[in-house]
Each structure stands twice: as C-alpha cells, then as structure tokens.
Amino acid sequence: ALNDAEEINAESIKIAALKGSTSEKFVKKVMEKTTFVGIEDYDAGVQMVIDGKADALVADFPICALSQMRYPDAGLATLSEPMTIEPIGIALAPGDSLFVNMVTNYLSALEGIGLLDALEKKWFEDGGWLIQLP
C-alpha cells in the first residue's frame, strides 16, 4: 500500500484529478514525476481507478471515503492520513453581519454538543444511507 505522496511520485504512476482543481495543482507540484490524467467529474475518476486506467485518484476526503463505501468490492482504499489539509468555507452575502454572526454561533454550538462529529460518523463511517442513491 502507498502511504504518502513521495511513494506515489514515480513515472510509472497515473494519477487522476479533477481538471482545474486544487487536486490537479497538488499532483502537478508535489507528484511531478507521475502522469497526470485530468477528469471532468469524480465518477469518471473513480471508474478509471476501478478499471485500472489510473493508479490513484487525488480528491477531497469525502469523495474518497464515499467512493470506498459505494464500491465495497472494488478494492478501493484511502490513505490513513490526508496529503493536505484545506479549509472548507461557507460563502455568505456581504454586508449582513447579523447573519454571519448567527451562522458562526450555530456552527460553534453544533460542534460544542458533538453533532458535527456524529454527522461525520454517520456520513463517512456508516454508509447505510448509500442504498438511497440512484
């Protein structure tokens, strides 16, 4: 199993990533020896890995975790630790400080009572909800 970017950075490795994404920039900068394969959407990238047309897909953790749960018999695996940590943001309309304050307080409260951790476990560890997908 490959554990980090250095082990993957070899000329014989084909890496798929979403075209124009930060994942593409990461692959081209950190894994410059690999062959980059640009994809239009994540489903195409996952299918390339399953079909052996790419050795790996570099994507956000939720995409990797979901793909592993969605295709349990495909032998997909994710790294135990992410290669990078990128903040996730929420875009709010400018000029409404009361709304910004409310969203900030609400998210802090959800984190404080453990709901965000519970939701992460539900969506990324359980996978029972996948049967509802088309």
Image (spheres, rainbow, N blue to C red):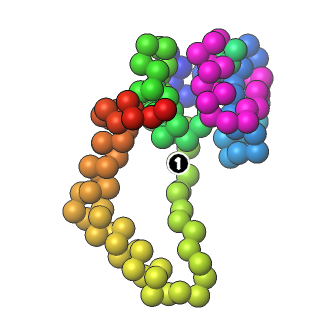
User: In terms of secondary structure, where does tag 1 sit?
Assistant: loop
Residue 79 location, x and y as percent? 48, 29
Q: Considering depth in this image, is 6 or 57 the residue closer to the camera?
A: 57
Which residue was labeled with disc 1?
Answer: 85
Q: Is residue 61 above or below residue 75?
A: below
Residue at the spot 74% in from the left edge and 23% down from the top edge: 34
Q: Is residue 24 above or below residue 71?
A: below
* Kind of residue sitting beneath label 1: Ile
Q: Considering depth in this image, is 74 or 17 the residue closer to the camera?
A: 74
Q: Mark 1: few, some, or many residues within 10 Å (few <14, many ≥20)?
A: few
Give the quadrant of residue 131. Answer: top left
Q: Would you say 113 lies left or right of 84 here?
A: left
Tell me, yes or no, if residue 3 can be seen here.
Answer: yes
Residue at the spot 43% in from the left edge and 13% down from the top edge: 73
Q: Is residue 30 above or below residue 95?
A: above
**Is residue 50 on the magenta stretch?**
yes
Residue at the spot 26% in from the left edge and 57% down from the top edge: 115
Tell me, yes or no, if residue 9 can be seen here.
Answer: no
Residue 17 location, x and y as percent? 69, 34
Q: Which residues are magenta?
A: 33-52
Residue 24 location, x and y as percent? 72, 39
